[in-house]
Amino acid sequence: MTNAQHVSGETQIHWDAKLNTCNNILGIDDDTLRESLTAAPPLHETKRWQDTFGNNAVYLGRYIIPNEYVLYDEEEQPRNKSNEDQHVQELINSYEQQGYRLQSQPPIAVPGANHLNPYHVKGLSGFHRLAARESISQQLYIYDLYKFSSPKWERVARNWTNHHLDPKLNQTWRDYEKEVTNAIDANIIEKDADSIKDYVNLIAADRSYTMRDRICKACNDTHQVHPNFRAFASRKGDGPKTLQGYLKGLNFPLMGFQSRTDNEGEAMKAQGYILYSADCGDVLRGWGSGLYHSTLWNIPVWLVGYSPNRVDNIIKFREKFIEDFVDYKEMLIKWAFKVSGSETTDVAKMLELIDQTTFEVKLAGFYPQYVKPDPKHGGNPTEIGIVDVYGKTLYSDASQFDPSADCLTLTQP
């Protein structure tokens, strides 16, 4: 990133006029500013900044700005206690003993778009350093000025630039929790587990995984946010959080065929299909018992897939599910050709010789397990009903299900 923009000439004139009247105990001047660019280059020059911020930040330059033109919002400060007296005193001692430290990263600010005075800037970091400067009557300081694409990126930058060589107050996990709360309250991020996790990974990128995980859990508890992955219990019963109960809520019949085998399975024949839940594409219950009874009663077996455990990428899980399903299906086809005495050994040739739409074990779809609220649909879960690999609803009710339909694996992924 380069200095793509600068402050206006009028702004610079106002700052310069004020600088001529400012107390300057630390002796900061244009030479100090030039030397600081070498001793403490702007953060946007680092690869880490470029990889994270991309085009979400524009550097406006490094300037000497009068304190009078730098405004801070105390409520936005990430510290749990906005201004620590002991920390400010340590900064005062540093200024009095060492002066301005060229190697210390300057605080950053952004143009004050919402301020009445167009020459004001909004300080993002350096809140305690300003308090220390005011105590020693230092009325000007060096700032790196940026313009960010949104308030979210302003806050990320503020947290990054709280780490410098002057005496600093280390941010605790509680401070980061407050930062997340401020972002949620300001509608900068959504109040859901994925948004919180992504934001924490940005503002606390240099913290350990353990600390970031602790911050996320604390924020989820504070805001009563639950992870966006829905798990279903496989235990017996028909509660809404069980596999059977969810399908019952969509008016599907009971899974399996228990208590419906009398009179040569008349009840199952009338039902028209056998239904199973499957946690993997080669689930033995669906293939073994299902195929036997499917052949016995001349009805198809339909599987509804699900992940028994939380997964980071539900689409990849479903794609692997279908891969396993197809592999098992092809193995059975090879077996059938072998026992029939066929000389065909190439699976591709076998598939050409049969009508796959008549294969009696089929995949209907998947349970809805990615349930992040969708703001476009009144906050309802993103996935509803029985869904395809990508979460699109296939059946919101059993009345939409056609037992003679094609297997999902013939069209997806």
Image (cartoon, helix red, strand yellow):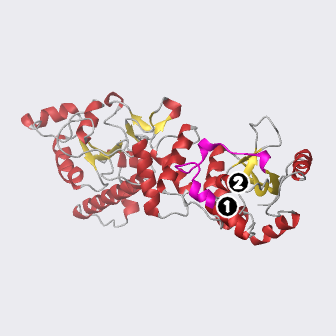
Camera-nearest residue between 236 and 171: 171
Residue 114: where, in percent of width, then height?
A: 74, 36
Per the rendering, the mark at residue 308 is none
Left or right: 124 in relation to 62: left
Q: What residue type is labelled 2?
A: Ser
Asked if the stretch drawn in magenta spans residue 183, the answer is no
**Secondary structure of the residue carrying numbered label 2:** helix
Q: Do we see residue 63 in this rendering?
A: yes
Q: Quadrant of the N terminus?
A: bottom right
Residue drawn at 53 percent across, 56 percent down: 201
Q: Mark 2 points at which residue?
A: 135
Q: Do we see residue 389 in this rendering?
A: no
| Residue 45: quarter of image | bottom right
> Which residues fall within the magenta stretch?
67-89
Q: Which amino acid does label 1 sit on?
A: Ile
**Secondary structure of the residue carrying numbered label 1:** helix
Q: Do the residues labelled 2 and 1 touch (CB within 8 Å)?
A: yes
Number of labels in the image equals: 2
Q: How crowded is mark 1: few (under 14 residues within 10 Å), some or many (20 or more)?
A: many
Residue drawn at 76 percent across, 37 percent down: 115
Residue drawn at 36 percent across, 52 percent down: 310
Q: Mark 1 points at which residue?
A: 92
Which of pointers 2 and 1 lies earlier in the amino acid sequence?
1
Camera-nearest residue between 156 and 56: 156
Residue extending furthest toward the left: 263
